[in-house]
Image: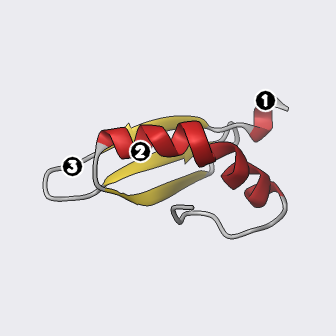
Amino acid sequence: MTEKIPILQIRHADGEEWKVAATWSDGRSEEIKGFKTETAANEWIASSFVAWLEQADDGGAKGARR
């Protein structure tokens, strides 16, 4: 199960939106973009990450904020 859970990092660069970077143990990575604040990114992790991960496991679209 742990290989199905990516490492998450909240990232931000000057002039850009906040994003959550997800990196899997095999080196694949995804960026979930569209957050106005770090708090919003943290709230997404707390409230929506599990559903996003389940959708990704089902072959759903990744990389977009849910």
Q: Secondary structure at mark 3?
A: loop
In the image, residue 59 sits, relative to residue 10, either above or below, namely below
Q: What amino acid type should be assigned to the residue bearing mark 2?
A: Ala
Badge 1 is on which residue? Answer: 2
Q: Secondary structure at mark 2?
A: helix
Residue 16 lies, in percent from the top left, at: 22, 58
Q: Is residue 8 left or right of residue 1?
A: left
Q: What amino acid type should be assigned to the residue bearing mark 1?
A: Thr
Badge 2 is on which residue? Answer: 41
Q: Secondary structure at mark 1?
A: helix
If you read the primary sequence from the N terminus, does the residue marked by circle 1 or circle 2 appear first? Answer: 1
Q: Is residue 16 left or right of residue 19?
A: left
Q: Quadrant of residue 7?
A: top right
If you read the primary sequence from the N terminus, does the residue marked by circle 1 or circle 3 appear first? Answer: 1
Image depth: mark 3 or mark 2 in front: 2
Q: Quadrant of residue 62?
A: bottom right
Badge 3 is on which residue? Answer: 13
Look at 78% across and 40% down and name the residue there: 4
Q: Is residue 27 at all visible to an observer of this figure?
A: no
If you read the primary sequence from the N terminus, does the residue marked by circle 3 or circle 2 appear first? Answer: 3
Q: Quadrant of residue 42?
A: top left
Q: Is residue 66 left or right of residue 11?
A: right
Please state which of residues 22 and 38 is positioned toward the viewer in this rendering: 38
Structural crowding at the residue carrying mark 3, measured as other residues with C-alpha within 10 Å and reported as few (<14), some (14–19) or many (≥20) = few
Q: Is residue 57 at all visible to an observer of this figure?
A: yes
Tell whether label 2 touches label 1 (CB within 8 Å): no
Q: CA distance from mark 3 to mark 2?
A: 14 Å
Image depth: mark 1 or mark 2 in front: 2
Q: CA distance from mark 1 to mark 2?
A: 22 Å
Which mark, by number, is residue 16? none
